[in-house]
Amino acid sequence: MFRGVIFNRDKLVSDGLEPARRCLEVGSGPPSAVLVYDPRFLDHIASPFHVERPDRLRSIVSHLERADLFTDVERAPPATPAELARVHNATYLEYFRNLGEGRLDPETAVHPGTFDLAALAAGAVLHGTRAAVRDGRPSVALVRPPGHHAGPDYGGGFCYLNNVAIAAADQVAEGRRVAILDYDAHHGNGTRDMFAGSASVLYLSTHEYGIYPGTGPAEDVGEGEGRGFTVNVPFAAGCGDASYLAAHDRVVEPIVEQFRPDVVLMSLGIDAHYRDPLTSLVLSSPGYVELVARSAALATRLCGNRLAVALEGGYHLDALGEVIAGVVGHFRGRSTRLALSEVLDDTGRGKSAIEATIRAHRPFWNLR
């Protein structure tokens, strides 16, 4: 569905003339991040005892408050119909808005008011992204419901509207290139489907392959003009710190550097944590913070701290809270206590997945 500005790949990877909109080089570290949050996000309840529940945000806020990091918090208006329509079909938006009581899939219930709360979450990520672009400082949008499983004409996987995709399309409409780094444990099939044919958005996902939604093999490199701009690292169960950091150094960093984005968006799910009940990946809390820190350094170097982080999944409350507090603390130059620090992958179990991704993308990018 999405049709963005198409860029010449030769210009993106050239060592000669810089692309016209390349960002200025900046200093060595990001300035303090702004938080985007609204207590109304607690009102979203898909069903009793649902794993995607308000306690997720309560845990995050509690951890931030204990670390004296729940400051510089902003609210945002909901996304407008025109902003939603950049990536979602009108028929889907009308169906979702008017559904009342129903389900988009067995785990994604709709009630009166769900549409408004989903639009509010999308508006928060839009606001955080625009602020990051305007001010050259990272933003962290603490939102629910999450979004990356929502596609052009469908929802599911606890997602209704694709928060990050809506923000990315907003930036493309302003003529900017956008890199989306999806670190949720589940493949962001909705985001992929929205941008698979576009060369103006680089979508890069690390995920556990074979679990919901079952998409995201290394060989999926996009479609048409977008070939090479969809990048999947399909990890197996048991991959954690060493695998993720190797993927960042060998896949994420070189491809993003060659793409030269104007904005970096991050779909950050904490469900790749070893304590998460839904997946079998084994990232530790320090591993998560280091992964985000390396990506933030990349955004600092390439596009002037224009980095916007949006919360996706993560269902172990303490793991979720301490990782987000660690991420915000990193942005603000503060150390936080990370108790869940056991390293269960120190050998790089994901090497085969990384190699598969590199093989699939050597025709498009300079990779070793």
Image: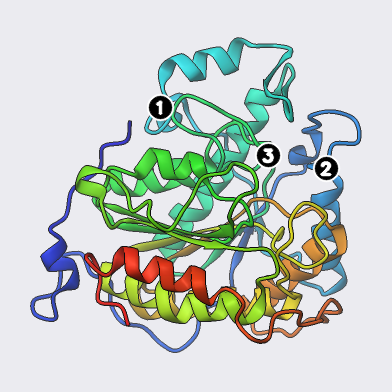
User: Which quadrant of the rendered structure holds the N terminus?
Assistant: top left
Badge 2: few (under 14), some or many (20 or more) residues near its Cα, within 10 Å? some
The Cα–Cα distance between marks 1 and 2, rounded to whole angstroms, is 29 Å
Question: Residue 256: horizontal and vertical position, in percent?
Answer: 35, 70
Q: Which residue is mark 1?
A: 85
Q: Determine which quarter of the picture holds residue 60.
A: bottom right
The Cα–Cα distance between marks 1 and 3, rounded to whole angstroms, is 18 Å
Name which residue type carries label 2: Val
Frontmost residue, 294 versus 215: 215
Q: Is residue 11 left or right of residue 123?
A: left
Q: Determine which quarter of the picture holds residue 61.
A: bottom right
Residue beneath the point at 84% across and 36% down:
50
Name which residue type carries label 3: Pro
Name which residue type carries label 1: Ala
Q: Which residue is mark 3?
A: 145
Question: Residue 315: horizontal and vertical position, in percent?
Answer: 80, 53
Residue beneath the point at 78% across and 42% down:
52
The Cα–Cα distance between marks 3 and 2, rounded to whole angstroms, is 12 Å
Instruction: Give the SS element for disc 3.
Output: loop
Instruction: Give the SS element for disc 1.
Output: loop
Residue beneath the point at 60% across and 64% down:
34
* Sequence-first disc among 1 and 3: 1
User: Do labels 1 and 2 touch, CB within 8 Å?
Assistant: no
Q: Which residue is mark 2?
A: 51
Residue at far left of view: 17
User: Which quadrant of the rendered structure holds the C terminus?
Assistant: bottom left
Residue beneath the point at 80% across and 59% down:
276
* Sequence-first disc among 3 and 2: 2
